[in-house]
Structure formats: structure tokens, C-alpha cells
Amino acid sequence: MMASDYEYDAYLAFVPEDAVSGMGIAHDLPAYVRTFSEMWETTWISLVEGMSRCRSFVLIASPHSASSPLVRRQVEYWRENRDMNSFHIVHVFGEIRWDPVRGDLDWERTDALPDSLAGAFSERPKVVLHIDAPSDPEDMPRMAVALAGRPRKSWERALDSTRRSADRVGQWRPRTLLCVLLMSLLAIAWVSSRSLLGSYQASGLGPSDAPAAVASIVSIGTVVGVLIGGTLSGLAKLIQARGQKDADLVRANAEMVRAQADMIRAKAGLPPTESPAQGALAAPGAEAEIPEPPAS
């Protein structure tokens, strides 16, 4: 099957203990990478159906996933039915050791991968991402290319084109609205001035009455200026509100990811997290520092 024939680009396999890392990866990948994970369903039929809809398999590797019978079974299914070139590893924590003499993983020291991968690789398996390693800005783009199976430049061009179009629409929309409002206000002022001057002519008013007409026109101009100022102020507040909305959306997404992780942990009988993760890809299992009691 071609890459475009799959509904999703990557199937994420992880256990509840690694839910923060798994969901963080799905959140941080570029938008064009379509990820799939069965967080709630545990029936084997649903898992097989999910894997059949995905182009790649991503194992969130840790001692937790290595000891999970369900994860081991998913790995076995992918190994038996799909190409292992589409099998990718994200290393959360634990050991992954290669034995060059035997040409296989060193299973005496490797504890982050299930033993169902014994003999699956002819060379040291490539890890597409190390959670506990210093972050590299290119990590996610490289991982996205590996999972999606599409040239990076083509997607960057498409994304840049979409982004530029959205930016142009976003820039011209308030400008167009402002121009329409200004033209409307000027038209109202012009019509009002013409009507006022026509009224003075119809009444047969002479030159001595001109100052009153001028004062009326000036008053109308003042009102128009106030309306324009109010319009500009309203547009400024609108732009500020849109920025605040984006910030609130980012915070809401972070809270949603944390809440989903807590739900997964609760379903697995694990205690909820004490505090939000420092980053979307923070390594789980890090123990919080316990403050020393104050001196008596």
C-alpha cells in the first residue's frame, strides 16, 4: 500500500505509565502527521483494526511497555504482518543495548524493549527520538518525515503556502473592515453636509448665515472623527482579544492533555500526577524533590 492509502501515519503503542510522553509526542508532531492510539479500548480486535489503518508503528520504549503483555502482542503482530522498516522506537527511559558480536540486542542489559523483538533487527535499531536526551529543534521534523513517509520539503511548501494564505486573510480582514467603515462614515458625512447646505439654500439664507452652516459641518466632522477613533480602538481591542484567545487555547490544550493522562493513570490504578509536566515531552518517572522540613 502507498503512504496515501493509510488513514493514519503512525500508530502509537504505550502503556498508561508512559501516557504523558505518548500523548506529548502526538501533540508536538507537525499537524500533517496523523497519529492514532488506542487509549481506552483494550480489545485485541480494536487494536488490530487500528494498526491496519496506520502506515508506521511507534513504540514508546520503557521498562513499563517492555513488561506489558499487550504491548508485546502488538509488537509481535506488527513484526509478523508488516515491514519492520516502518517500525520506529521512541526511547523514554531504560536501557537499549546492542551486541555486535551476536548481531542482536543484548537482552541481559536491554530492559526498555519487549523480548518479542529478539532477532528482529540485523543492525542496531534506530531510535527516532530520545526523550531524556537534550532536545534538538530538528528532532520532531526528522521524526515527522520518518513517520509520514513524505519528503519534508513538499510538506513544508504546502504548510508555508497554507500559513501564508491564512496570514494574508487574517491581515486583510481587519483592514477591509476598517476601510468599509471609513468609507461608510465619509459617505454619511458627505450626504449630511450636502443635505444641510441644500436646506440652507432652500431656506434662502444669505452669506451672514454661512458661519452657522460651517459650524454645523465642523460638528459633523467632529462626530465622524470620534466614530473613527472609536472604530480604531475597537479594532485594537479585537486584535488583543484574539491574542488572548490563542493563549487561552494553548493553556486549555495543555490542561486537557494532563487530564487525559490522569484518566489513563486512574484507569490503570495509578495515582494522579502531582503537578503538570514541565514540557510536553518530559520524561515520566522523575521523582519530585521533597522539601526539607523547616528547622525547629
Image (cartoon, rainbow, N blue to C red):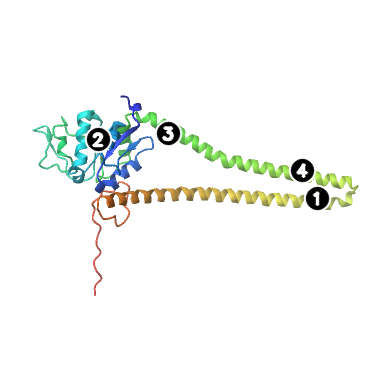
> Which three-letter amino acid code belongs to the residue tagged 1?
Val
Q: Is residue 128 visible?
A: no
Which is nearer the N-term, disc 3 or disc 1?
3
Q: Secondary structure at mark 2?
A: strand
Q: Which residue is mark 4?
A: 191
> Which three-letter amino acid code belongs to the residue tagged 3?
Leu
Q: Is residue 191 visible?
A: yes
Which is nearer the N-term, disc 3 or disc 2?
2
Which is nearer the N-term, disc 4 or disc 3?
3
Residue 159: assigned label: 3
Q: Where residue 108 appears, x then y in whole percent?
A: 10, 41
Distance between the alpha carbons at the discs numbered 4 and 2: 71 Å
> At 49% across and 48% down in the image, what residue appears?
243
Circle nearer the viewer, 3 or 2: 2
Q: Where residue 42 appears, x then y in whole percent?
A: 26, 42
Crowdedness near tag 2: few (<14), some (14–19) or many (≥20) residues, C-alpha within 10 Å: many
Q: Where residue 253 appears, x then y in whole percent?
A: 39, 48
Q: Which residue is mark 2?
A: 88
Q: Secondary structure at mark 3?
A: helix
Circle nearer the viewer, 3 or 1: 3
| Quadrant hosting residue 291 | bottom left
Q: Are marks 4 and 3 in contact (CB under 8 Å)?
A: no
Which is nearer the N-term, disc 4 or disc 1?
4
Position of the N terminus, as image quadrant, is top left
Q: Which residue is mark 1?
A: 214
Q: Are marks 4 and 1 in contact (CB under 8 Å)?
A: no
